[in-house]
Image: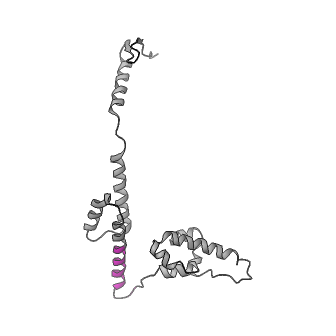
Amino acid sequence: MVLSLSAKNKLQFVDGSLPPPSENSPMFPKWPRVNSMVISWFLNSLHKEIAESVLFLQTAKEIWSESHREIRTCSCGASGKIQKYLEDQRLIRLLMGLNESYKITRGQILMMKPLPCLSTTYSLIIQEERQRDIHTSPAINNDAIAMGATTDSQFCSSNKSLTCAHHKKTRNFHPPSNS
């Protein structure tokens, strides 16, 4: 989200570096419109239950502060364990959100010790999807290949007589000359 906001030059709406302007400022009419746009991005990217819980907030900064909480580092190392626990919970939510056709993939990922990170899991799921696409792509029509082979062999031989199966007419076939 930070990357997207930075790319659109809207990060200052969530980090507090661009507070709402005063009512007599020429920027006053524009600021609420852009703030509303950033809020809509947040609401569309949040889970429905979380979006409903922050819908009453007025600024993108307030929503960001409510939805995004950093775990502060400490000297005892507990913050790293908490961070890993939270990432594992997000991973499990992702896996449980997959439909039943991913049952085997989900089981394989959950059996990994330690659990992979979200990006690795996402890559594994995408790889599985691509494999499915390969296996479900239309099969090559063997009849068309055989017809092509028959046609090619006709060009290699001398004059042939071809019969139309529909009209029962015979025609002589003369292959193109090489010169």
Which residue is found at the position 35% from the left and 81% from the top? 82
Q: Above or below — where is 92 with respect to 166? A: below
Quadrant in the rendering for residue 87: bottom left
Q: In this view of the protein, which residue sits in the foreground, 154 or 58? A: 58
Q: Specify the principal SS of the magenta part.
A: helix
Farthest residue in the bottom direction? Answer: 75
Residue 92 percent across, percent down from the top left: 33, 70
Color encoding of the figure: one colour
Residue 125 percent across, percent down from the top left: 35, 60
Q: In this view of the protein, which residue sits in the foreground, 48 or 27? A: 48
The reply to whether the magenta stretch includes residue 12 is no
Q: In this view of the protein, which residue sits in the foreground, 38 or 16? A: 38
Quadrant in the rendering for residue 166: top left
Q: Count of labels shown?
A: 0
Find the magenta span and give its range: 73-89
Left or right of 133: which side holds 48?
right
Left or right of 115: which side holds 170?
right
Left or right of 13: which side holds 170?
left
The reply to whether the magenta stretch includes residue 78 is yes
Quadrant in the rendering for residue 152: top left
Residue 17 percent across, percent down from the top left: 60, 81
Residue 2 percent across, percent down from the top left: 51, 72
Which residue is found at the position 33% from the left and 47% from the top? 135
